[in-house]
Amino acid sequence: MFIFKGDSLYIDIAQSQRQVSAFKLVKNSETKQSVSYNAYESYLKDGKVTYREVLIKVTKDKGKNFVLEYFGKDKDREYNSNERYTIRLVE
Protein backbone atom coordinates (compact mmCIF):
# COMPACT_ATOMS: atom_id res chain seq x y z
CA MET A 1 0.00 0.00 0.00
CA PHE A 2 1.36 3.43 -1.00
CA ILE A 3 -0.09 6.39 0.89
CA PHE A 4 0.79 9.93 -0.21
CA LYS A 5 0.01 12.45 2.51
CA GLY A 6 1.27 16.03 2.30
CA ASP A 7 4.99 15.88 1.57
CA SER A 8 5.34 12.25 2.70
CA LEU A 9 5.01 8.76 1.24
CA TYR A 10 4.24 5.78 3.47
CA ILE A 11 4.82 2.26 2.14
CA ASP A 12 3.57 -0.98 3.69
CA ILE A 13 4.43 -4.19 1.84
CA ALA A 14 2.37 -6.89 3.55
CA GLN A 15 3.57 -9.92 1.57
CA SER A 16 7.18 -9.35 2.65
CA GLN A 17 6.16 -8.67 6.27
CA ARG A 18 8.26 -5.50 6.25
CA GLN A 19 7.64 -2.53 8.49
CA VAL A 20 6.19 0.63 7.02
CA SER A 21 8.74 2.87 5.30
CA ALA A 22 8.20 6.61 5.47
CA PHE A 23 9.81 9.03 3.03
CA LYS A 24 9.89 12.82 3.07
CA LEU A 25 9.37 13.90 -0.54
CA VAL A 26 11.06 16.86 -2.20
CA LYS A 27 9.79 17.41 -5.74
CA ASN A 28 12.61 17.83 -8.25
CA SER A 29 10.70 17.74 -11.56
CA GLU A 30 7.16 17.59 -12.89
CA THR A 31 5.53 17.16 -16.30
CA LYS A 32 1.93 16.45 -17.32
CA GLN A 33 2.61 12.72 -17.13
CA SER A 34 5.12 12.32 -14.29
CA VAL A 35 6.54 13.69 -11.06
CA SER A 36 9.92 12.79 -9.60
CA TYR A 37 11.05 13.26 -6.03
CA ASN A 38 14.21 13.09 -4.00
CA ALA A 39 12.94 10.94 -1.14
CA TYR A 40 14.52 10.83 2.30
CA GLU A 41 14.04 8.09 4.89
CA SER A 42 15.41 7.87 8.42
CA TYR A 43 15.88 4.51 10.11
CA LEU A 44 17.92 2.88 12.87
CA LYS A 45 21.13 1.07 11.99
CA ASP A 46 23.23 -0.36 14.81
CA GLY A 47 21.21 1.75 17.25
CA LYS A 48 21.93 5.04 15.43
CA VAL A 49 19.60 7.14 13.31
CA THR A 50 20.71 6.88 9.69
CA TYR A 51 19.38 8.63 6.60
CA ARG A 52 19.23 7.54 3.00
CA GLU A 53 18.15 9.28 -0.20
CA VAL A 54 16.44 7.59 -3.13
CA LEU A 55 14.69 8.77 -6.29
CA ILE A 56 10.97 8.08 -6.62
CA LYS A 57 9.20 8.74 -9.91
CA VAL A 58 5.42 8.50 -10.38
CA THR A 59 4.09 8.33 -13.96
CA LYS A 60 0.44 8.43 -15.02
CA ASP A 61 -0.52 5.29 -16.94
CA LYS A 62 -4.09 4.63 -18.06
CA GLY A 63 -7.27 5.52 -16.22
CA LYS A 64 -6.60 5.53 -12.50
CA ASN A 65 -3.31 3.63 -12.80
CA PHE A 66 0.16 5.00 -12.09
CA VAL A 67 3.65 3.51 -12.27
CA LEU A 68 5.83 4.14 -9.25
CA GLU A 69 9.57 3.62 -9.81
CA TYR A 70 12.12 3.55 -7.02
CA PHE A 71 15.87 3.94 -7.56
CA GLY A 72 18.50 3.80 -4.83
CA LYS A 73 20.35 1.78 -2.26
CA ASP A 74 18.00 -0.36 -0.22
CA LYS A 75 18.36 0.01 3.54
CA ASP A 76 18.11 -3.77 4.09
CA ARG A 77 20.69 -4.78 1.49
CA GLU A 78 24.19 -3.84 0.39
CA TYR A 79 23.30 -3.15 -3.25
CA ASN A 80 21.30 -0.68 -5.30
CA SER A 81 17.67 -1.43 -6.00
CA ASN A 82 15.44 -0.52 -8.92
CA GLU A 83 11.82 -1.41 -8.30
CA ARG A 84 8.67 -0.73 -10.29
CA TYR A 85 5.06 -0.95 -9.10
CA THR A 86 1.77 -0.36 -10.86
CA ILE A 87 -0.51 1.39 -8.40
CA ARG A 88 -4.14 2.46 -8.57
CA LEU A 89 -5.63 5.64 -7.19
CA VAL A 90 -8.09 4.94 -4.39
CA GLU A 91 -10.22 7.88 -3.35
Image (tube, rainbow, N blue to C red):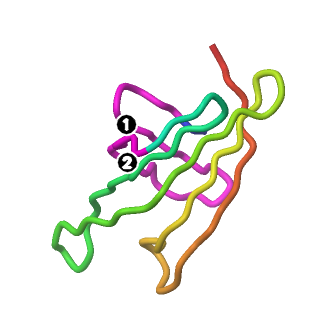
For residue 46, what is the image quadrant?
A: bottom left
Which one is earlier in the sequence, the residue at label 2 or at label 1? 1
- Which contiguous range is marked in magenta? 3-28
Q: Can you give x and y, in whole percent of width and height, for residue 89 in the image?
A: 68, 24
Q: Can you give x and y, in whole percent of width and height, for residue 22 in the image?
A: 38, 47
Task: Give yes or no for residue 4 being in the magenta stretch.
Answer: yes
Q: Are marks 2 and 1 in contact (CB under 8 Å)?
A: yes
Q: Can you give x and y, in whole percent of width and height, for residue 27 in the image?
A: 39, 40
Which quadrant holds the N terminus?
top right
Residue identified by numbered label 2: 23
Please tell me which residue lies in front, 30 or 38: 30
Alpha carbon distance from label 2 to label 1: 6 Å
Q: Is residue 78 above or below residue 25?
A: below
Residue drawn 49% across and 69% down?
72
Q: Is residue 35 above or below residue 89?
A: below
Q: Is residue 28 left or right of residue 1?
A: left
Q: Is residue 21 left or right of residue 79?
A: left
Amino acid type of disc 2?
Phe
Please tell me which residue lies in front, 73 or 20: 73
- Would you call the spot at circle 1 few (<14 residues within 10 Å), some (14-19), or many (20 or more)? some
Q: Secondary structure at mark 2?
A: strand
Residue identified by numbered label 1: 8
Residue drawn 78% across and 34% down?
61
Amino acid type of disc 1?
Ser
Q: Secondary structure at mark 1?
A: strand
Residue drawn 68% across and 54% down?
15
In this view, which residue lies farthest toward the right? 62
Q: Is residue 48 above or below residue 18?
A: below
For residue 71, what is the image quadrant?
A: bottom right
Which quadrant holds the C terminus?
top right
Per the rendering, the mark at residue 69 is none
Residue drawn 63% across and 60% down?
16
